Amino acid sequence: MRLDALKETLLDALSNQTAFTIPLLGGIPVAESVVVSWIILAVWMVLALVLTRNLRVRDPGKVQIALESAVSFLNGFVKTSIGRHWRPFAPWLGTVALYIAASNLIGIFGLVPPTKDISVTAALALMSMLLIYGAQFRYRGLVGGLRQFGAPMALLAPINLMEVAVRPLALCMRLFGNILGAFIIMEMIKFVAPAVVPAVFSIYFDLFDGLIQTVVFVFLTTLFTGEGIQEAD
Amino acid sequence: MLDFQPSTIFFTILNLLILYFFLRKFLFGRVNAILEQRAALVREELDAAEEGSRQAQAAKDAYEARLSGAREEAAQIISEAKGRAQAAYDARLSQAQADAKQVLSDAQAQAEAQREAVLCSARDQVASLALLAASKAAGRALDGEDDRALVSAFLAEVGEQA
């Protein structure tokens, strides 16, 4: 009986719920993950507005110092990875990092992490792919961008072309798999021992793993982007 | 589990773009603007500080040059004054020495003259006495000019021999 209940819970955890359906074009389903994403968006937007309310050049407050350090860290990281053309990439990578981090960590507050939905991670990976190869063609031109597929030697061109699909797939699956795995494990632990114990494991599976996966996703995207456009001048 | 839902992908991309444009304007844009302004401010203040220190150095050099000039001038003035004082001292001293010599020589001359006068008068008196004695002995007055000159010559002869 208990095993049946566990199976039920797990199946429930694996499936993606549809929050509601927009009655347009024969019904557009809006997944739970999208609704949670909206909450995350709202939180980040409000936080951004509140935190950047009173920025001062001289005599910054504690909050501003923390904010500046974080943005400087992001800028420095993107600068070292991408090089001369880092500037337009930093805000996007920062946005992705904030979104994924919030998505991974929101399980702590009892909400379903949006990154547990493969469609969400697929969208993230798709955007990363557009960024990586868009940047490659943007900074190298059409010919240079195509030639980059033959780097470092023409022999590797098939592998490089395959990577166009493999990279986003790997990004998508890694994030999805980790968060889904952590989510399922947490559900199981909650099922077996509902008190105290989940909190302890949550530190690893929700907090640590969530942050690590955020860093991995953003780091790899930055790395690939940098690889595509570096030495382009 | 592995069902890609186009609507979710679309909504997520939309969400990401919305969040991106929002954060780029209101978070990264604002913070980066502040960071750049601060960097510009720091650069400006560094430049100003360097300029100020350069000016201070120049002023210090000028003061030092002027100070050493003044010191040299002072030393020159002092040495000039010393020289002048020395000269005045020497002049005064030599003047005093000359005066002393003068006084001394005057005194000597006076003493010599007195002595001469005394000697002369003594000689005259001796001559008178000798004349008197001789006239007594000769029985007549030997008061002519010739006699006197004779006695004087005699006495001079005697004085030289004595």
Image (cartoon, helix red, strand yellow):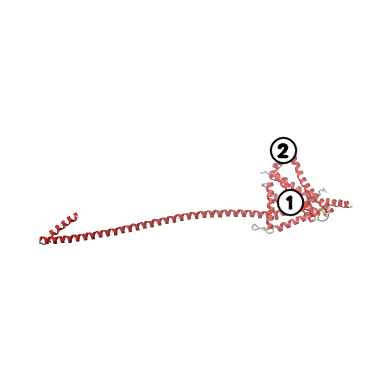
Task: Please give the chain letter of the residue carrying mark 2.
Answer: A
* Residue lying at 49% horizontally and 54% vertically, measured from the top left: B64
Question: Amino acid type of disc 1?
Answer: Ala
Question: At which x and y percent is residue A41?
Answer: 75, 55
Sequence-first tag of 2 and 1: 1
The residue at which mark 1 appears reads as A97
Image side of residue B120 versus residue A110, left or right: left
Residue A6 - label? none
Residue that extends furthest to the right in the rendered view of this protein: A1
Seen from the viewer's position, the closer of residues A108 and B11 is: A108
> In which chain is the residue bearing label 1?
A
Q: Secondary structure at mark 2?
A: helix
Q: Residue furthest top?
A: A155
> Quick check: A189 left or right of B144?
right
Q: Looking at the rendering, which quadrant does residue B91 occupy? A: bottom left
Report the mark closest to the observer, 2 or 1.
Answer: 1
Relative to residue A128, is residue B96 drawn left or right? left
**Could you tell me which residue is drawn at 54 percent across and 55 percent down?**
B56
* Quarter that holds the C terminus of chain A: top right
Tally the marks. Answer: 2
Q: Nearer the viewer, residue A117 or A233?
A: A117
Residue A157 vertical placement versus B88 (above, below): above
Q: Which residue is mark 2?
A: A154
Q: Secondary structure at mark 1?
A: helix
Q: Is residue A137 visible in the rendered structure shown here?
A: no
